[in-house]
Image: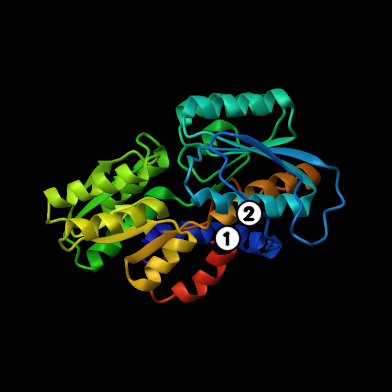
Amino acid sequence: MNHTTKGNTMRIKRSRAGVVAIAAMLTIGLAACSGSGGRQEESGGGGTGGSVADTPRLRIAMITHEAPGDTFWDRIRQGAEAAAAKDNVELIYSNDPQAPNQAELIQNAIDQGVDAIASTLSNPSALTPLVQQATDAGIPVVLFNAGGDAWKDTGALMYFGQDESIAGQAVGERLSEEGAQKAVCVVQEQGQVQLEARCDGVVRGFTGQSEKLYVNGRDISSVQADIQAKLAQDNAIDRVVTLGAPFALAAVQAADAAGGNAEVVTFDLNEDLTEAIANGDVLWAVDQQPYVQGYEAVDSLWLYLTNGNTIGGGEAVLTGPSFVDESNIEAIAEYAQRGTR
């Protein structure tokens, strides 16, 4: 079920040709992945079992704002590693949730002289100068997942992700259709533009009352405690909107402990969350397809470096939003078990 706005529909149509082209290129492959917690890791790109592109070996750095313990990024890396295996790419992955540290990781990639960089843009003011520095040095950059409103100002070639404002508005509209009256939007990393845009979108689409609750997403026990305290303080809250799967599961525990009538909805998926939707513990989730984001971030750079291709016609290529609920969870769960949804 897709409750996107008319504006969202128009934007998705503009990207439809690019998305169809992407779908034609996708070769689903499985590769082991694990959280890195600020480490830099190199992947030889093995593990798909398929043929490897007969093109020169490339070194592509992928730099994200992944925080330790957030399983969302496993899907990003799974897609990136599958594309690297197909494209004869050495993937160098590094991450840090703090913008100054992520900027330093981009600088490291520039200094290493990598062939290309794929990065998130969670803090445009801190990261844009580094992206521009890379492009000035002749290193092509693709952005994904975060910074969809600012990516064109950086000099990057392409952007893959969902429009977070539109996704948030779609969530707000669905809450209104369901008759919700008061919602709290839980932000696990204050100041990250994509998270703020989601909650701001919820406000625009929701006819009821809503507010933000800032929590420390790196301490899941404190996330649960903060949500529980908020629900105990205000029993008029009937929806908790979280911005990632692990936080939704914490919110379920918090709602149970607090009592009341609060139901949980969320952005993003993982295998545990699909079970929670199937069981009715979480009403629904918004899927931005992180596997596709990781895959296309790498594969688009390979296409650019080996054939001069760009995707999207100068516009962001939208990978979401789409809703996952009891009507389609059975099909989605199969892919979640593979680690690709």
Tag shown at residue 339 = 1
User: From what the image shows, is residue 23 above or below residue 217?
Assistant: below
For the residue carrying disc 2, how many other residues have a C-alpha within 10 Å: few (<14), some (14-19), or many (20+)? many
Name the residue: 74% across, 46% down: 302
In the picture, measured across the screen, residue 78 lies left or right of residue 100, that is right
Viewer-side residue, 84 vs 48: 48
User: From what the image shows, is residue 265 above or below residue 178?
Assistant: above
Residue 320, position in %: x, y?
Answer: 48, 58
Viewer-side residue, 305 vs 281: 281
Q: Is residue 116 visible?
A: yes
Which of pointers 1 and 2 indicates the residue nearer the eye? 1
Q: How did the renderer colour the structure?
A: rainbow
User: From what the image shows, is residue 257 above or below residue 38?
Assistant: below
In the picture, measured across the screen, residue 303 lies left or right of residue 268, that is right
Residue 190, position in %: x, y?
Answer: 34, 35
Q: Are marks 1 and 2 in contact (CB under 8 Å)?
A: no
For the residue carrying disc 1, how many other residues have a C-alpha within 10 Å: few (<14), some (14-19), or many (20+)? many
Name the residue: 49% across, 59% down: 12
Residue type at the position of mark 2: Gly
Q: Earlier in the sequence, mark 1 or mark 2?
A: 2
Viewer-side residue, 53 vs 78: 78
Viewer-side residue, 167 vs 10: 167
Name the residue: 68% across, 63% down: 28
Q: Considering the numbered disc 1 on the image, is that residue within a helix, a strand or a loop?
A: loop
Residue type at the position of mark 1: Gly
Q: Considering the numbered disc 2 on the image, is that residue within a helix, a strand or a loop?
A: helix
Residue 118, position in %: x, y?
Answer: 63, 40
User: From what the image shows, is residue 286 above or below residue 165?
Assistant: below
Q: Which residue is mark 2?
A: 79
